[in-house]
Image: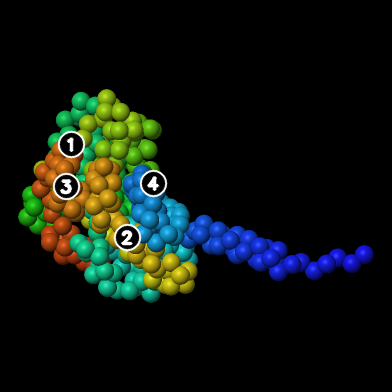
Amino acid sequence: MSIPPPSRSSTARWLAGALAALGTSVAVAEISLLNVSYDVSRELYKDINPAFATAWKAKTGEGVVINQSHGGSSKQVQSVVAGLEADVVTMNQPPDVDVLAKAGLLKADWRRRLPFDAAPYTTTSVFLVRKGNPKGIKDWSDLTRPGLAVIVPNPKTSGNGRYTYLAAWGYALQKSGNEAGARDFVAKLFANVPVLDGGGRGATTTFTQRGIGDVLVTFENEAALIDQEVGGDQFDVVYPSLSIEAPAPVAVVDKVVDKRGTRAAAEGYLSFLFSPDGQEIIAKHHFRPRDPAVLKKYTSRFPPVKTFTVEGALGGWEAANRTHFADGGVYDQIVVKR
């Protein structure tokens, strides 16, 4: 008994079904991005990522999944240089992104690709003290008192730690009027540091969970997060008389996105950070947004604080890194004498 060949109508139905299935698989296909970021931005991007994915899907019809990697900023950058395929980097200091440019992973004009030198928000260094401020810590000068334990992350591996060091240096430079006075002040401060964690989140754990230290110097947003998660009945935030402005730069890693074909989504992801929706999420996480309207809406979260910049007060990042953080620089000399 022979089997008759399929009819044209059944073949057409089969072909239509196959094409429909293929179309469905294409429609639900997703691309992925890897955002390599610094230690204390975890919670921010947990909210940014799904908001961007929804906006990108609505705009392009394309699904996107964003994966995260967090750690001390300088360590993170070295991981990217060593081969970690980051589509984007979202760091807390411009020199880390410059390292990637010098390594040929992205173009040197990365600052000019987005507004505000490619930094969608800023923050500043503040003090977190035990509830009631039992040690009476009010300003940087208090951190040099004998017997006080100050918790900061390692400036050699953490942008948070680097900003702390430079904030103290800038304060002392203004007070003393000379480099020698600043060096003496910072040496006294770091003599009070009992442990140097690799990143800002590690320093937070040391202070809040291990109970080490009288004061934690950290970013404003991290202090607010601690207050929310641990409870305001355990800690107080103290704003010093002078602090440092810490813009958080972002960049597309050109070599990776061109290899992976993810440039459009990566650029869209970083642009979303500057959008009203992105700025709203940024402000809710206690980072200071760039959008004036959003900043005004959340003004109660951001008390006025007098700040200086590395570029304006310390000769720029290249000079600061060469003087203070290069091997054998001032920071190494200070630590050796601890």
Rendering quarter of residue 87: bottom left
Q: Amino acid at mark 4?
A: Lys
Secondary structure, mark 4, is helix
Rendering quarter of residue 204: top left
Cβ–Cβ under 8 Å for marks 3 and 2: no
178 vs 124, left or right, is: left
Q: Amino acid at mark 2?
A: Leu
First of labels 4, 3 by sequence position = 4
At 39% from the left edge and 49% from the top edge, which residue is drawn?
A: 50
User: Which labelled disc corresponds to residue 238?
Assistant: 1
Q: Alpha carbon of mark 4 to alpha carbon of mark 2: how far?
A: 15 Å
Structural crowding at the residue carrying mark 4, measured as other residues with C-alpha within 10 Å and reported as few (<14), some (14–19) or many (≥20): few
Secondary structure, mark 3, is helix
Residue identifier under label 3? 295
Residue 137 visible, this angle: yes
User: Which labelled disc corresponds to residue 46?
Assistant: 4
At 31% from the left edge and 35% from the top edge, which residue is drawn?
A: 226
First of labels 4, 2 by sequence position = 4
Q: Alpha carbon of mark 3 to alpha carbon of mark 1: how far?
A: 21 Å
